[in-house]
Image (cartoon, grey):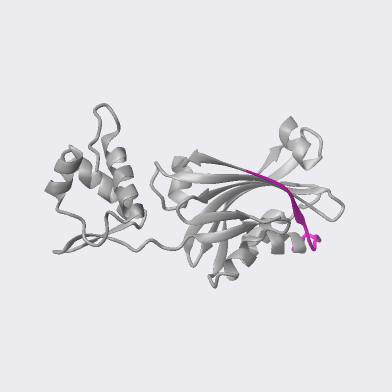
């Protein structure tokens, strides 16, 4: 393994190298002693411990009293199909896992020109903005920000808070079905707030999906920006 160059955020680089070793299989079972690893990376033991703590928080390592630090078996990524009918609950249930959703917060905002264009409303119109957390078997997978027309879906916040499902909440608001018109995906560094919700290290990466859902008449229903935990999710686009 390489050593750490001077002037860099050393504990992060150590964490990256350890993570790479776990993924390629060169690190497995019990880790070498701290002193050996510190010498290998050219860092002090405090820096090494900070890197190990980060990977333990991500679930890649575990400490056993009196035995040392061990590599956990990497959990299988959840395969998440993205298509015309993208539904979180259906995707999770199809893999024999239990879906869940929680409202983090909600507020009312005015549509700016960009959002109005996506939702086919007027700039200045009132929108419901929801911040939601989505889990499978209790493990956080994604954080999403959604915008809905307050006039068309006046009770969407309360409906989602009660059921934890966008599909069910929209049904309560009178919309039986909707489809995905467009999805764009990029990658970003985790924000501190999202890292906390996803129980992930703040130097991690998320897959960011920007999507528009529409009804049977092609009227926009929801504008959606979702941040998927890159180590726990695999997006599959189906045509």
User: In the displayed structure, does residue 121 sit left or right of residue 38?
Assistant: right
User: In the displayed structure, does residue 85 sit left or right of residue 121?
Assistant: left
Q: Nearer the viewer, residue 187 or 127?
A: 187
Residue ID at (80%, 63%): 176
Q: Residue furthest top?
A: 7
Residue ID at (17%, 64%): 65
User: In the displayed structure, does residue 124 sit left or right of residue 225?
Assistant: right
Magenta span includes 57: no
Q: Is residue 77 above or below residue 143?
A: below
Q: Is residue 8 above or below residue 204?
A: above
Residue 239 visible at all: yes
Residue ID at (52%, 61%): 78
Q: Is residue 159 above or below residue 50?
A: below
Horizontal and vertical percent position of residue 17: 30, 44
Q: Residue furthest bottom?
A: 96
Magenta span includes 179: yes
Horizontal and vertical percent position of residue 193: 47, 43
Horizontal and vertical percent position of residue 204: 42, 44
The magenta span reads: 172-184
Residue ID at (56%, 69%): 95
Q: Residue furthest right?
A: 217
Residue 112 visible at all: no
Horizontal and vertical percent position of residue 62: 27, 60
Number of numbered markers: 0
Q: Is residue 151 above or below residue 76?
A: above
């Amino acid at each position: 393994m390489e050593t750490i160059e001077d002037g860099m955020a050393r504990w992060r680089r150590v964490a990256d190298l350890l993570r790479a070793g776990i993924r390629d299989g060169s690190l497995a079972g019990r880790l070498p002693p701290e002193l050996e690893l510190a010498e290998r990376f050219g860092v002090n033991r405090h820096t090494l411990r900070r890197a190990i703590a980060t990977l333990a928080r991500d679930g890649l390592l575990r400490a056993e009293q009196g035995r040392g630090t061990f590599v956990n078996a990497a959990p299988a990524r959840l395969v998440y199909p993205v298509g015309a009918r993208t539904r979180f609950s259906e995707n999770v249930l199809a893999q024999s896992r239990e879906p869940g959703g929680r409202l983090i917060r909600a507020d009312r905002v005015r549509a700016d020109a960009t959002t109005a264009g996506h939702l086919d409303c007027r700039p200045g119109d009132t929108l419901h903005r929801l911040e939601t957390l989505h889990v499978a078997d209790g493990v956080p997978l994604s954080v999403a920000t959604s915008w809905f027309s307050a006039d068309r879906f006046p009770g969407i916040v309360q409906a989602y808070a009660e059921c934890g499902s966008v599909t069910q909440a929209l049904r309560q608001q009178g919309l039986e079905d909707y489809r995905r018109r467009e999805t764009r995906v990029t990658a970003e560094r985790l924000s501190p707030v999202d890292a906390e919700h996803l129980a992930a290290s703040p130097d991690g990466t998320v897959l960011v999906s920007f999507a528009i859902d529409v009804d049977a008449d092609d009227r926009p229903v929801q504008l959606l920006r979702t941040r998927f935990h890159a180590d726990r999710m695999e997006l599959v686009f189906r045509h």
